[in-house]
Image (tube, rainbow, N blue to C red):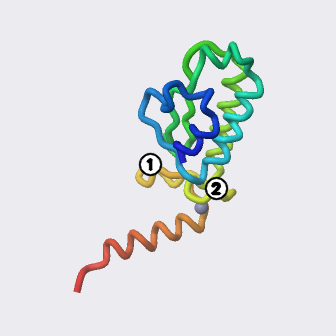
Amino acid sequence: MLIRLIAAHPALFVDGLPPFTSTLPEGWYAIAHTLCCSIEDRLTREQLAICSVARITASLGKLDFTMMGIYPKAIDLLIDGAGLLSRVTCQECGERPARFRGSKVNRTLCNFCELERCIRENRAWAPKH
Ligand SMILES: [Zn+2]
């Protein structure tokens, strides 16, 4: 998903990749894509030349999107909004509502994806015959 986002928004990524280790869960692609579109809409070509995406990660069930360089404060509000939206959006399938499933799971999941995860883990934990 990260490669797809970079391909769609090359002006926001210097040298084709964020300089810090990044990952984008599939379910949050739409949030990140909309955020990148909004950032591109609000910045001039000159402003885009002096800032870029530093890192994208999933941190404690939230999309963590970090910019570096010089950019208007309004961009931080867009990033904050995307982070809040990610807290109620399933990071696996993109459905809402979803909720953070705790630090052990460390994921924001809808009920369906949470159920699937539990089934998968129960199978993994089943004794072998
Ligand atoms: Zn889901």
Q: Quadrant of the C terminus?
A: bottom left
Q: Residues within 10 Å of mark 1 (few under 14, many from 20)?
A: few
Task: List the residue tagged with mark 1.
Answer: 103
- Give the residue type that dot 2 points to: Gly
Rendered image quadrant of residue 96: bottom right
For residue 94, the mark is 2
The structure residue drawn at horizontal position 53% and vertical position 70%, both measured from the top left corner, is 115
Q: Is residue 8 above or below residue 25?
A: above
15 up-or-down from 98: above or below: above
Residue 63 percent across, percent down from the top left: 57, 40
> In the image, what residue occupies the spot 66% across and 41% down?
33
Residue 9: give x, y in percent of width and height.
63, 34
The residue at the point 24 percent across, 81 percent down is 128
- Nearest the viewer among 60 and 29 is 29
Q: Position of residue 32 (x, y in %)?
A: 63, 40
Residue at disc 2, secondary structure: loop
89 relative to 23 in the view: left or right: right
